[in-house]
Amino acid sequence: MTADLKHTLPGAIAIVVLALVPLLPVPPFWITLLNNIGLASLVAIGLVLLTGVGGMTSFGQAAFCGFGAYTTAVLTTAYGFSPWATLPLSLIAGAATALPLGLITVRLSGHFLPLGTIAWGLALYYLFGQVELVGRYDGISGIPPLELAGHRFLSGQSIYYVIWFFVIATAIGARNLLDSRVGRGIRALRGGGQVAEAFGVDIVRAKLTVFILAGIVAALSGWLYAHMQRSVNPTPFGLNMGIEYLLMAVVGGAGHVWGAIFGAGVVLILKDLLQRFLPDLIGSSINFEMIVFGALLVTILQFARDGLWPLVLKFAAKRPTRQPAAAGSLPRRTMPAVGTPLLRIDMARKAFGGLVAVNDVSFEIKAGQIAGLIGPNGAGKSTTFNLITGMLSLTSGSVFYGGEKLSGMSPRRIAKHGIARTFQHAKILPTMSVLENVTLGAHLRGSAGVFKSFLHLERQEEATLLAEAARQLERVGLGANMHRPAGDLALGQIRILEIARALCLDPTILLLDEPAAGLRHAEKQELSALLRKLKEEGVSVLLVEHDMGFVMGLVDHLVVLDFGTLIAEGKPAEVRQHPAVIAAYLGEVAA
Ligand code: ADP
Ligand code: MG
């Protein structure tokens, strides 16, 4: 069996079983339960994208269900719309609510973000209860059922198919999205999103995208609910349900799309069992079930931090990674003419409170040069990199690229000029494959958006981006590790991975922050050879490095910083004789 078949078989069997259930003589409440699981799964899939992948915790998703449900309820009962006609309108209502809330919420950080979602979750719930148009706390009844080709979806059995059609379609779309260029940008939001920014991902936009998507799928759930239940009131759209949805996503394993369905199943089945059997078991009619329910969930999460889905996956065949098939190559940038001024740092200053980390530093790098930036620890080298790439803002001074002023631009716009970097403290997404980590570097060379990615219509472009990443990985000597999780690599290899990622941007200049740290001698020589090769191709390099043997033999130009101040600059052989440089380095050795 091929890996592909092995991987898809269990899913296919699950779908066939799901399709057969209503045809078997099962008790009706099974169907009701499965319908509810389907509806909850939709919301939970949204939360997987938002919370599990995007890292934004929301307790307020039930409110979006409400907007979806009430939109169709009002339009079908008061204005005579047909249910299918309201589907796009309900989804738009979800998106339209998510947009302003998202604009406010995604800028919140730390605990303020979930608190913000609680606030609007509560506010919207009370809104449903207060507005005359939507029937206040009584809600709206008499909602027409769905109809298709003359068939009215009146029974639980019949709407079951509609619900699960949408659940499976949404799950497949969400998976497609995560495996795409847009999805890599979203996944890179984890851990602060610095890498994402450095490679041109628009962070606010990526966050808003998941926020709106999560709102849309919740609204879809609400739309289905309204036509299943045929009446709506505010109760299912309150904060309680918002919390329960989040629980489902977490129990399933917040980063896994299919886990959302599993989590919804576990939570709802557990709740149902407890409600039915617990009163008999403990011979009391007091509402113990919520307490036991809570305790059980806490226990589950104690034993399986990452939720239950990863445990299920252990028994499943591994998902085959998308292969970088033979694909067209990407257009290259024209490199600036060798010897022309490329990057100019002009009186750059960065103060952190009273500490001046970079003190009015000026230097220039010419196209086609390998330049070294050296200095003792704490000299301000990494800070200089952050000033050039826009990760930090200058206190005063400027940075120019060609004739253009870079300072003041976002890291994303700076990256677009062809400025790529690695990080002193390597920043990778450890659970993503080496190949996917590197493909993130090619973000700016693709253009497929959410819609195309969701439907996996960006195959051609995606294959080209993956092929480019594979090519760069081969080039730096990591080809054999392409499909391993990046977190499995040794530190030295991770530094090389970062170089491959930077190369995917098709850079005019590479900023490498201590690339040789942790490399063995032979690996350093390979790195040196690679950098020389890049230079031949017209790529400029600015490199921070402590290994003087490595630096001296490689660079054309050397800049020395000490305590934030430029103390010497010039050809390596001259600079190493400079008294201030000797003093700075002797000082460090003495210390
Ligand atoms: P280098 O890379 O040359 O070792 P850095 O640029 O990392 O040095 O740091 C220069 C100085 O600035 C150090 O004293 C460091 O502690 C300080 N520094 C760097 N980043 C920050 C920050 N975000 N906040 C406060 N101080 C910082
Ligand atoms: Mg540093």
Image (cartoon, rainbow, N blue to C red):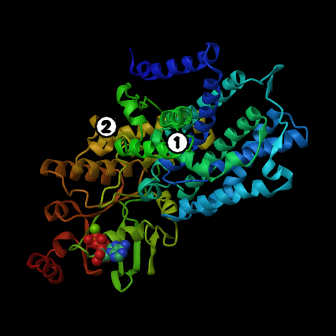
Q: Position of residue 430 (x, y in %)?
A: 34, 46
Identify the residue at image location x=31%, y=54%: 535
Q: Quadrant of the N terminus?
A: top left
Mark 1 or mark 2, which has the lower sequence index? 1
Identify the residue at image location x=49%, y=42%: 293
Cβ of mark 1 under 8 Å from ligand 1: the answer is no
The residue under label 2 is 484
Q: Relative to residue 429, is residue 586 drawn left or right? A: left
Identify the residue at image location x=57%, y=60%: 106
Amino acid at dot 2: Arg
Q: CA distance from mark 1 to mark 2?
A: 44 Å
Q: Position of residue 354 (x, y in %)?
A: 36, 86
Q: Splitting the image into four quadrants, where does ligand 2 fall?
A: bottom left
Q: Relative to residue 578, is residue 417 drawn left or right? A: right
CB under 8 Å between discs 1 and 2: no
Relative height, residue 331 to residue 353 (above, below)? above
The residue under label 1 is 289
